[in-house]
Amino acid sequence: KKSSNYQAYKVIKRTWFLQLKNHVEDSLLQKQKIITQANNQILADKKEKQDLQTQIDSLKNELTKIDTSKNQISFLGSTIEKDTFRLIFGASLLVLLGLLIFFILKFYKSNIITQDALQKYNELEEEYNKFRATSLEREQALNRKLLDEINNNNN
């Protein structure tokens, strides 16, 4: 609007043109700085993403190690899975319980046999004492008869 006409061309002042050029260069420099900053930010974000991915991978590895160590038990110097340990422990517990029941039954049976033997022994001892008493009475009776006969023969 402010330019003048020279034949069929529009003519502007040189100072305006230089001022426009400076403004455009300043705008381009500013945009270039913004683009550079954005590129630097993108590179920083990519590096941070790689660092975070590395941390995620290391945390996953640690989690896997913790899970495997959580599912294992150190027993007698070797590592055993918890399920295997439970199976072994349960089986040994059942075997020991079975042996305990077996020995309790054996003790009960032997105790019954012992009590029966003691009862028979007591009965036999009682019978023997009766037999001895009757034998002693018979012997004393025979000795009296013998003495009576000896006394009768001597008189």
Image: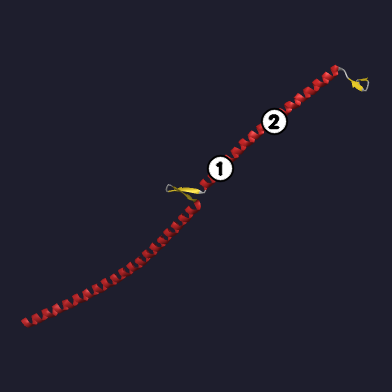
Instruction: From the top left corner, tell me how far across and down residue 24 is, in percent.
Output: 80, 23
Residue in view at x 65 percent, y 34 percent: 46
Numbered tag placed on residue 120 in the rendering? none
Left or right for 36, reference 7:
left
Camera-nearest residue between 51 and 31: 31
Where residue 16 sits in the image (x, y, percent)? 85, 18
**In front: label 1 or label 2:** 2
Please name the amino acid that badge 1 sits on: Asn
First along the sequence among labels 1 and 2: 2
The residue under the point 10% across, 82% down is 149
**Of 103 and 122, which appears nearest the observer?**
103
- Judge whether residue 155 can be spotted in this image: no
User: Residue at horizontal 40%, vertical 61%?
Assistant: 99
Q: How is the image coloured?
A: secondary structure
The extreme front residue here reads 7
Q: CA distance from mark 1 to mark 2?
A: 33 Å
> Image quadrant for the N terminus?
top right
Q: Residue at the left extreme?
A: 154
Indicate the amino acid at tag 2: Asn
Q: Residues within 10 Å of mark 1 (few under 14, many from 20)?
A: few
**Residue 126 horizontal side relative to residue 77, left or right:** left
The x and y percentages for residue 110 are 34, 66
Q: Is residue 50 visible?
A: yes
Mark 2 secondary-structure assignment: helix
Which residue is under mark 2? 39
Q: Quadrant of residue 14?
A: top right
To which residue does mark 1 refer? 61
Q: Nearer the viewer, residue 82 or 138?
A: 82
Q: Secondary structure at mark 1?
A: helix
Q: Would residue 111 be found to the left or right of residue 92 on screen?
A: left
Whether 53 is drawn above or below 27: the answer is below
Q: Is residue 118 above or below residue 92?
A: below
